[in-house]
Every structure is written in structure tokens, then in C-alpha cells.
Image: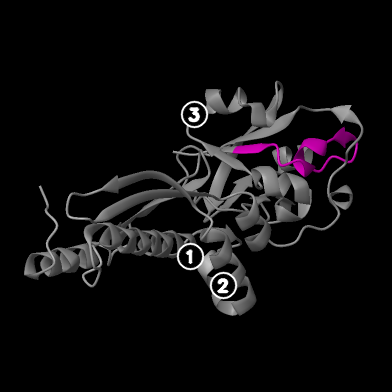
Amino acid sequence: MRRFFFGAGTIACACVAAAASAAPTASIDWEKRVITATGEGAPDLGAPNPAAARIGAERAARLDAFRNLLETLKGVKVSGGRTAGALMDADASLAASVEGVLRQFTVLAPHYFSDGGVELTVQMPLDGKLSTLLVPACRDPAEAVAASGADVGSGLVIVAKGLPVVPALAPRILDASGKVVYGPGFVQTAALRQNGIAGYLRDAAAAEQSARVGPRPLTVKAIAARGADVIISDADAKKLTDPHANLGFLAEGKVIIVID
């Protein structure tokens, strides 16, 4: 059990905590669409008492958690191979906005040690403010999809099992020639903010029963993957570009990609 001392033992503890925080401790759950991170803070060595030291430790843990969230988010693919980090590096205003959103993380599980140190588990949703900032602006979805005509389903499930799909905030669906048949330019801004471009699940049966795609989803099998882009056959691509079909579910982001 660690104990609270204002001396060499605490300094050693602080050094250990700093070393442990050097590597980002965070992960992404693409099914729940959240980033979860931990942050650690050692007691404030200059504090006048244990209570004040713990306040300093919690402040340090929050900063550590924020850094881990940010480092992990920077590696997330957005669309077309570009990462969130690349977009932020190219736009200082965007970077500042994203960092501001990340600082609004939710603390899930604080852990207070006997020596005054603190460890926090925090979480931030990928959808909502983050996706609105990072995903390219959408054009009018009415120009991209037919919203009236023959009923072909309530949503879309793309089975990409066995393919090297890299989850992304704004994946694209391509035909065999590389033409985009679904992507960020097809989705209404409100739907993008709420659900993102597409969800990811690991079980095809669960995907077909998901509320996201409704009771009668159209299911197609991917033939290849290139990073975050998923490629389907030309025959299946025609189903998603049929001007006589009701494809309004695409504008609502009612898409799930099934991955390993």
C-alpha cells in the first residue's frame, strides 16, 4: 500500500507515475464509438497538507487523461486515409476546437490512493461535437441519394469479415472502379452529429438486428478493403445508386460495417 510522505519516497512515486504516463493509455471502442483513457497524477509535493496534495494530483491526472485522449484521437482515420492528427496539424483553429471538446470528457472511475495519488478513467464520444468538427462538410444529401421510389430496405449492412478494414470516422463505400457510392457527402448534418457516417459491429446477425439499420436492412458483402474504404461489387453498387429506389436511409447514416 502506498503512503503519503512529503519526501524522497513521494518524489520516487511521482517519478514512477510520470514514467507510467509517458506512453498514452487509451483505447477506442468502435462498437460503442467512444475513446476511453486513463490519467495518473502524483501528489503535489509543494502542498501544505494531504488534502491540497490530492487536489493537485487530481488536476495532474485530468491533464494526463486529456493528453492520452488527444494522442489516441490523432491516430484515428477520418476519411480517404487522412488522420485526425493530419487535419489538426494543417489547421490550428481546428486543433484548438478539437482540444476544447476533448477537455469536456466524462470521468467514469476515479481512484484515490492512500499516498494522495489519483488515477482517473475518462471517456469521450466520437460522435457529436468531435465528428462535426473532423468530418468533411456534407453537401445537400438530396443531390446524392434518391429519397423516393421502390422500397429496398430500412438500412444497409456491409459484411466485411476477413478484410483488413481500418475503422474510421467517415468511411467510404466504393464500387469496383473506385467510385464513391456512399460517404460523408451523403449524410445529413444532424445524422452525422448523432450517429456518424457508419457504425461498426463484429457480428453480422447482431448488425442486421440493430436499431441503427431498422427492421429490414439491405445486406451486401464487401469484396475488398483499402484502409477505411470498403469496396463492393458493381452489382451491389448499382443498388445504392438506383435513381428509382428509396435510398433515404443513406442520408440518415443508417449503415453498419461488420468487421473482424
Is residue 132 at all visible to an observer of this figure? yes
- x and y, in percent, of residue 177 in the image: 68, 55
Residue 56 inside the magenta-drawn segment: no
- x and y, in percent, of residue 20 in the image: 22, 62
Q: Locate residue 115 relative to residue 109 in the image: left or right.
A: left
As rendered, which of 152 and 7 lies closer to the eye? Answer: 7
Looking at the image, tell me whether mark 1 or mark 2 is earlier in sequence order.
1
- Residue at 56% over, 50% down: 126
As rendered, which of 49 and 159 lies closer to the eye? Answer: 49
- Residue at 61% over, 26% down: 210
The crowding category of the residue bearing disc 1, from other C-alpha atoms within 10 Å (few below 14, some 14 to 19, many at least 20), is some
Residue with the most extreme front position: 48
Tell me the CA gap for discs 1 and 3. Answer: 28 Å
- x and y, in percent, of residue 233 in the image: 66, 42
Looking at the image, tell me whether mark 1 or mark 3 is earlier in sequence order.
1
Per the image, label 2 sits on a secondary structure element best described as helix
Tell me the CA gap for discs 2 and 3. Answer: 33 Å
The crowding category of the residue bearing disc 3, from other C-alpha atoms within 10 Å (few below 14, some 14 to 19, many at least 20), is some
**Magenta-drawn segment:** 241-256
Q: Locate residue 8 relative to residue 220 in the image: left or right.
A: left
Say what amino acid the circle numbered 2 marks. Met
Quadrant that contains the C terminus = top left
Per the image, label 3 sits on a secondary structure element best described as loop
Per the image, label 1 sits on a secondary structure element best described as helix
Do callouts 1 and 2 mark residues in contact (Cβ within 8 Å)?
yes
Q: Which residue is mark 2?
A: 88
- Residue at 12% over, 62% down: 5
Q: Locate residue 64 relative to residue 187 in the image: left or right.
A: left
- Tell which tag, 1 or 3, sits nearer the viewer: 1
Image disc number at residue 97: none
Residue 254 inside the magenta-drawn segment: yes
Looking at the image, tell me whether mark 2 or mark 3 is earlier in sequence order.
2
